[in-house]
Image (tube, grey):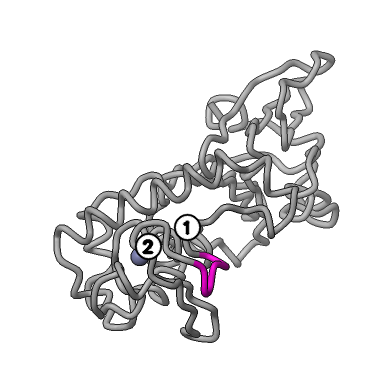
Amino acid sequence: MARRILVGRVLAAVSTHHASQRRSLPPRAVQRIVSRRVVRVERHAKHQHIVLDDGGIVAVHFRMNGDWSLANAGDPLPAYARIVFATTDGLRLCLVDSRALCTATYHAPGAPPMLALGPEPDALTPGLLQDALARRTGPIKTVLLDQRVVAGLGNIYVAEALWRARIHPAHRACALSERQLQALVRGITAAIADGFARQGRYRAGLRDRPFKVYDREGQPCQRCRASVARMTQAGRSTYWCPGCQGRR
Ligand SMILES: [Zn+2]
């Protein structure tokens, strides 16, 4: 839709309607975009690059469920409109995302965005994960935090996913078995789904987050009752269960 609506048109205004989008696209970036003509829109998996006539690029990332919605000037904005691109001839292309995870970032002429991010967690398959982990000899916990391996996995989700997959956090990343790769993809998917299901509770504060292992040092494992342990890997805390998370 972005290609059909934006290419050839001139941007009259870009507005952000949520704090996290304002951080990714601050007013000084918006200033560089406004009054530029869109020359093309490139698709890269879940990114779209809106290429401007001076060579600048607006990189839009849809994350889990962002999408475009079209409105005419004067229409009410659609629900969950996070970023709105208005054209000089009266169209408004809205980036809608109920979870507000989508982002748009501005990249000046000559400084295009990196495309070195790994696959998105929700597009992950055991085969893709195996490719991403090939030749990675480090511990799986640390390797999974590298955004070039899997995009967007943080410390909490990695701990939760490894526990679900019963994989030791120090296991060599490139040496996971096929069965472990399958379990890890299921674990990542489940950990993220669980996180979103409890999203409302995040506001209640860290103490109320019912994680499986994260932040549960010394408490009994919900699967095997062994005591959850904590160690430091690459400067970050790793929570894991010595009872049921296999051998390294
Ligand atoms: Zn356990």
Q: Is residue 165 above or below residue 41?
A: below
Task: Residue 185 in the image: state x and y as whole percent.
Answer: 30, 53
Tag 2 secondary structure: helix
Q: Position of residue 63 (x, y in %)?
A: 53, 44
Q: Nearer the viewer, residue 227 or 195?
A: 227
Using residue 246 as the reference point, say whether residue 24 is left or right of it.
right
Residue drawn 60% across the image and 67% down it = 111
Give the residue drawn at x 60%, y 66%: 110
Q: Which residue is identified by label 2? A: 163
Ligand 1, what quadrant?
A: bottom left
Q: Mark 2, residues whose alpha carbon is within 10 Å: few (<14), some, or many (≥20)?
A: many
Against 18, is 79 above or below? Answer: above
Name the mark on residue 48. Answer: none
The stretch in magenta equals 214-219
Q: What amino acid type should be assigned to the residue bearing mark 2? A: Trp
Residue 68 lies in quadrant: top right
- Is 216 a magenta residue? yes
Dot 2 beta carbon under 8 Å from ligand 1: yes
Within 10 Å of the Cα at label 1, are there few (<14), some (14-19), or many (20+) other Cα atoms? many
User: Secondary structure beneath disc 1?
Assistant: loop
Which of the marked residues, 1 or 2, is nearer the chain's N terminus?
2
- Asked if residue 49 lies left or right of residue 227, the reply is right
Task: Please state which amino acid type lies under the numbered disc 1.
Answer: Lys
55 left or right of 246 in image: right
- 155 in the magenta segment: no
Tell me how far mark 1 sits from mark 2, CA to CA: 8 Å
Quadrant housing residue 90: top right
Residue beneath disc 1: 212
Q: Position of residue 152 (x, y in %)?
A: 50, 58
Q: Is mark 1 within 8 Å of ligand 1?
A: no
